[in-house]
Image (spheres, rainbow, N blue to C red):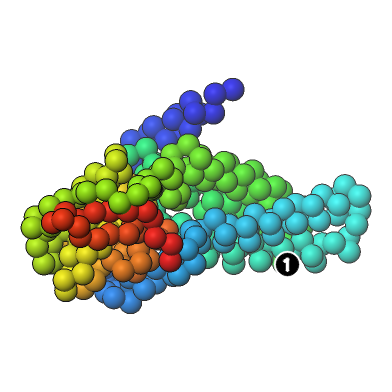
């Protein structure tokens, strides 16, 4: 079976795109209204502080808890192990709470990066997961009111929905490369190479050069030269088209901000540090050398 065709069919209806646009607009307006605090919340939810996307870590909570609930429910229903019923209920509740955190992180990653198929796949992924969380929350209500069989049935349906959502989450990462580091590994000059006449880079300026096929961002601030990989680790835009400000460079595409001195992420959505290179001036030329580990 060609699952790509299934994904294409599921994401093709026009309402998926318009719903995605509406949700993205809403999330964007909420963060915009929150100002700098909103940026801090986004950094936390992206995982900028962790150096790893937070969303895939959080999804383990609902998926793990609901897998436990499924096992306990089956043992209760099929093997008559009634003593597991309370454990199943607790696992359902933990999963619902975990799903809230995972949804917040996922929405934050998705709302401003998606423009085409990734936007639609992300929307359908979210719909399956919201559907699963709703089914589980309703299941919990039925369980509390003595309608255990109905509650178990809803939970089984929820497990099907979250499995479909998890498949689409994997599709976003493994097929569409969302959430992975977009700086190619081979972007590492091996020795100092002339990159630009020194006179062509003024104070407070930056530009893109190629050093042995490697795109490098050169910047000068307070008389100090900096060299970073020009390919943004978030989704591969050129940082040279962005903004140089206060010792950092901001990507023009989705606003990730990197420190010039060591390439660390100051603002997401990127969570991966930008590689930096040795840089010097020799015979009137700016030369770029090996990657500098920090
Ligand atoms: S490509 Fe998205 S922030 Fe740079």
**Foreground residue among 287 and 225:** 287
Residue at image location 85% in from the left, 62% down from the top: 84
- Relative placement, left or right, of 164 versus 285 is right
Quadrant including the N terminus: top right
**Foreground residue among 132 and 273:** 273
SS of the residue under disc 1: helix
Residue at image location 79% in from the left, 65% down from the top: 87
Residue at image location 33% in from the left, 72% down from the top: 38
**Residue 119's quadrant in the figure?**
top left
Q: Find the residue positioned furthest to the top.
A: 1
Give percent across and percent down for residue 270.
38, 58
Give percent across and percent down for residue 93.
66, 66
Q: How busy is the neighbourhood of tag 1: few (under 14 within 10 Å), some, or many (20 plus)? A: some
**Residue 17's quadrant in the figure?**
top left
Please name the residue that numbered disc 1 is placed on.
90
Give percent across and percent down for residue 12.
39, 32
**Foreground residue among 100 and 35:** 35
- Relative placement, left or right, of 98 versus 272 is right
């Amino acid at each position: 079976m060609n699952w790509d065709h299934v994904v294409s069919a599921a994401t093709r209806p026009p309402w998926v795109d318009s719903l995605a646009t509406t949700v993205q607009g809403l999330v964007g307006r909420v963060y915009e209204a929150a100002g700098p605090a909103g940026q801090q919340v986004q950094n936390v939810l992206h995982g900028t502080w962790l150096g790893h996307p937070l969303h895939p870590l959080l999804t383990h909570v609902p998926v793990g808890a609901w897998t436990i609930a499924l096992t306990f429910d089956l043992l209760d229903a099929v093997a008559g192990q009634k003593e597991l019923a309370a454990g199943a209920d607790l696992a359902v509740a933990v999963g619902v709470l975990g799903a809230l955190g995972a949804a917040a992180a996922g929405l934050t990653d998705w709302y401003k990066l998606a423009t085409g198929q990734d936007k639609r796949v992300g929307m359908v992924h979210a719909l399956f997961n919201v559907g699963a969380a709703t089914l589980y929350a309703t299941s919990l209500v039925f369980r509390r009111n003595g309608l255990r069989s109905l509650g178990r049935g809803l939970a089984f349906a929820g497990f099907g929905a979250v499995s479909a959502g998890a498949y689409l989450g994997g599709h976003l990462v493994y097929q569409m490369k969302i959430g992975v580091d977009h700086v190619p590994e081979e972007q590492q000059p091996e020795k100092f190479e002339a990159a630009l006449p020194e006179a062509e880079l003024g104070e407070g300026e930056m530009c893109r050069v190629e050093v042995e096929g490697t795109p490098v961002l050169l910047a000068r601030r307070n008389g100090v030269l900096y060299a970073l990989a020009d390919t943004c680790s978030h989704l591969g835009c050129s940082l040279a088209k962005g903004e140089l400000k206060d010792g950092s460079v901001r990507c023009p595409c989705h606003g990730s901000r990197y420190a010039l001195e060591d390439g660390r992420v100051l603002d997401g959505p990127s969570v991966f540090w930008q590689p930096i290179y040795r840089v010097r001036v020799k015979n009137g030329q700016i030369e770029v050398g090996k990657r500098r580990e920090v």
